[in-house]
Image (cartoon, rainbow, N blue to C red):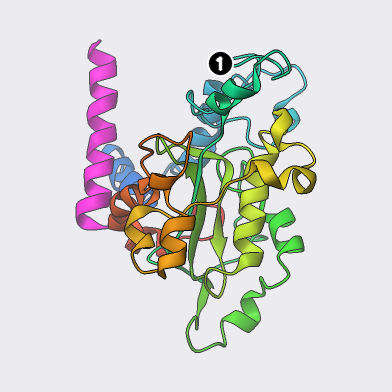
Amino acid sequence: MILLSLMFTESMKSLLTSVTSKVSAFEFYHCVACQSDNTGVKPIKDQYSWCNLKALKQAGHGHDPAGVSATKEGEIMVLCSACPHPGKNMPETLEDVSPGNQWIYSLFLAINANFHLKCQLVSSDDKDPGLSQGWGYFIKESNYKVNCVSHNTVNMADTKSSKGLAATGVGTVVCARHDMRLANGVRDLQKGEKYLNMDYIVFSTLSRFSSIPSHKKLWHRHSTIQVFHSEFHLATHIAACQTTFSFNWSPYVGRTDREVPECSWANINRVAVSTKEMAPGSR
């Protein structure tokens, strides 16, 4: 219990230091290391590798007989326990569920972007690659850049609105009811909230729920997909939108919390100054 208490205390110190003084995790770690040994005789251990191994261990992949490389996309993140997961909190199929009750297993997603979380063009993927590409919440960088052809950091660095930036913000897909980030539901944006980028993030998230029957053959089942606007943003739209896309006039949605992404942005924005300076792997 004493050890856990000390670990929690150090974790809180790191969080408070990052939030209040805008110091990055890298700088905080080196500050603590120098307090232990400031001679410079021994190299400071790489904390990023340790964090990566810890994430793999907690997800049950630290001692995989097939090796760490056998980890699949989205496998080291924490599942939203309220989202539908066949065989876990819902039947394997909906064939035995009456049509009138299938709405119980609906998936509620909220899509949003944050333009405070910019990132400067300080490095590259070759110099600072990620250790867990696509295994967690962020989409695999290589796949994303190949498909989102607008991602051209050289050209973007020369534009007036995004000069010197590798990313103009972050797009995300979350559980609209419980504010849980979903597997492969986060990625950097380029040149604003373009459909190209946001669509890729949405479908990457949906692919993690591909075992749910209602999400297979999506284009043939578009009638099962409903699109709504959050209450806060809906007021800025015309009257037709306010009635057509309102939660208040739609069945089977209840009193869903529609603004969960905004709540998370309010918390993470306090470390935006630190993340803005990070290279791709660290970010």
Q: Nearer the viewer, residue 249 or 217?
A: 249
Residue 121 locus on image (x, y percent): 53, 72
Q: Is residue 240 left or right of residue 100?
A: left
Task: From this view, report whether residue 158 is shown above or below residue 182.
Answer: below
Look at the image and give the residue range highlighted in magenta. Answer: 1-24
Task: From this view, report whether residue 68 is shown above or below residue 183.
Answer: above
Q: Residue at x 41, y 64 (%)?
A: 276
Residue 30 locus on image (x, y percent): 35, 47
Q: Which residue is mark 1?
A: 89
Q: Nearer the viewer, residue 144 or 197?
A: 197
Q: Is residue 20 magenta?
A: yes
Per the picture, the main secondary structure of the magenta-coloured stretch is: helix
Q: Residue at x 80, y 41 (%)?
A: 217
Q: Is residue 150 left or right of residue 281?
A: right
Please indicate, yes or no, whether residue 35 appears anywhere in the rendered image: no
Residue 245 locus on image (x, y percent): 48, 55
